[in-house]
Amino acid sequence: MSHDVSRRGRPIVFSAPSGAGKTTIIHEMMKQVDGLVFSVSSTTRSQRKGEVDGVDYDFLTHEQFQQAIDEGDFIEYENVHGQLYGTRASRVRPLLEAGTDVIFDLDVLGALSLKRLFPDAFLFYIDVLGREVLRERLLARGREDLDEIERRLTRYDMEREKAEQFDRIIVNDDLMKAVNETVAAVNEALAER
């Protein structure tokens, strides 16, 4: 898909509970759909092994994040499990105005906030086959302690309820099938412009 400055880019937003495979699906989909740019979110959480500042996230201190809030630079931001995550207008608006379709990785509340600002945003929710599958995946990946896993499972109930407001729900019970469904749906969303 080439950049067409005669039209504004379309925001394509992905949300999912932790452990649903959203990041993998986004990466695989972006290999197959040309012309997409990933929106780099800002966060106050610690940088994980293998993550690159400015590529995976803009890693900010709480003070830097608050300053950007005070300056009105966030399109949306949320407190997720005690850490702040947000999308900065100064990073995203120039891309959309240049006709670039932008991929966002947001929690459900952030996704719904973005949809209010950009009504043409297309929202995807990547789901799993229920709480127990999610619990097993979180345990298997071994990144969170049991208390953190319980917090994420509690949040899953709220997220799943809000997912009904999304444009497309894709259940990731088979990764390649989920990737193929996502690629087809993204292409369809971009074609309807």
Image: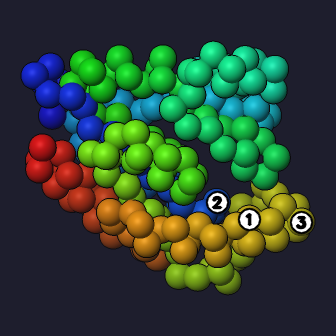
Q: Work out whether residue 3 or residue 163 is closer to the camera in this orientation and state it.
A: 163
Question: What residue type is disc 2 on?
Answer: Ser
Question: What residue type is disc 3 on?
Answer: Asp
- Horizontal arrangement in the rendering, residue 18 relative to residue 88 (left or right): right
- Secondary element at image label 3: helix
Q: Count of labels shown?
A: 3
Q: How far across and down, in percent of the image, does residue 84 sit?
A: 72, 38
**Residue displayed at 62% across by 38% down:** 77
- Horizontal arrangement in the rendering, residue 7 relative to residue 73 (left or right): left
**Structural crowding at the residue carrying mark 2, measured as other residues with C-alpha within 10 Å and reported as few (<14), some (14–19) or many (≥20):** many
Question: What residue type is disc 1 on?
Answer: Arg
Instruction: Name the residue that disc number 3 marks.
Output: 147
Query: Which of the numbered marks, if any, corresponds to residue 152?
Result: 1
Q: How far across and down, in percent of the image, does residue 62 sit?
A: 81, 26
Q: How far across and down, in percent of the image, does residue 75 sit?
A: 51, 32
Instruction: Name the residue that disc number 2 marks.
Output: 18
Snapshot quadrant of residue 174: bottom left
Snapshot quadrant of residue 53: top right
